[in-house]
Amino acid sequence: MRVSDLERLYDYHYWANKRLLGVVAWLTPEQFTRRVSGSYGSIRNTLVHVLSAEWGWLGRCGGPERGERLNPGDYPTVDSLTQAWMRVEGYMRDFLSRLEDEALGRNVEFALGEGQKQSAPLGDLMLHAAVHAVHHRGQVALLLRTLGFVPGNFDLLIYVGDTRGATV
């Protein structure tokens, strides 16, 4: 893996987020925070979890520190969440632009919650953060459908077609 691979993956990640958040923006504040099935209880809570995890992994790997896990209550609107994500996107892009390929193999210590300390290569942790988001975007897409919204297609091949002008 090279830094350029991570940059491309995060380009896709932010493209997919923008498409998904574009649909989420149509929700009423009540729909955004409504208790629905799923791991985190609402569309807002699920998206805040993804943002919090992304920023947390970035901080562990040497980017700007997030501090405490993000609180969904601090994001009452889609716009407040979108603004925070744009800030974190800037942090991530800046971090990746300064990262060297050799650093991707450097072990980073971390703990999941109150769990035991472990370590993994920086590149794997950054890869994990992006893949983690894919999983939860799929959950949010399903939750949107239960509320009557069509999230559209944000598969990687659609991104490739959009960014390269190809028909997929």
Image (cartoon, helix red, strand yellow):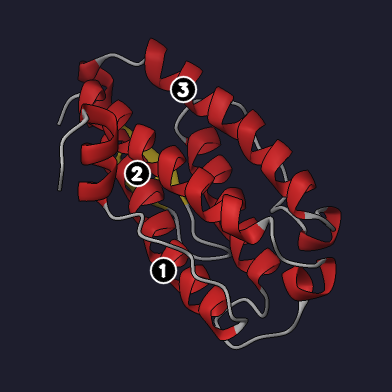
How packed mark 2 is, by other alpha carbons closer than 10 Å (few <14, some 14-19, many 20 or more), is many
Seen in the image, is 71 located left or right of residue 119? right
Looking at this view, is 8 or 122 the one in front? Answer: 8
Work out whether residue 158 can be spotted.
yes
Q: How much space separates mark 3 and mark 2, taking CA atoms?
A: 16 Å
Image point (77%, 72%), residue name? 33
State which mark lies toward you, 1 or 3: 1
User: Looking at numbered disc 3 in the image, what kind of residue is underneath it?
Assistant: Arg
How packed mark 1 is, by other alpha carbons closer than 10 Å (few <14, some 14-19, many 20 or more), is some
The residue indicated by pointer 1 is 138
Looking at this view, is 125 or 115 the one in front? Answer: 125
In the structure shown, which secondary structural element does the residue marked by tag 2 occupy? helix
Percent x, y for residue 34? 76, 80
State which mark lies toward you, 1 or 2: 1
The residue indicated by pointer 3 is 93
Snapshot quadrant of residue 164: top left
Q: Is residue 124 above or below residue 144?
A: above
Residue that protrudes farthest toward the bottom in the picture: 37
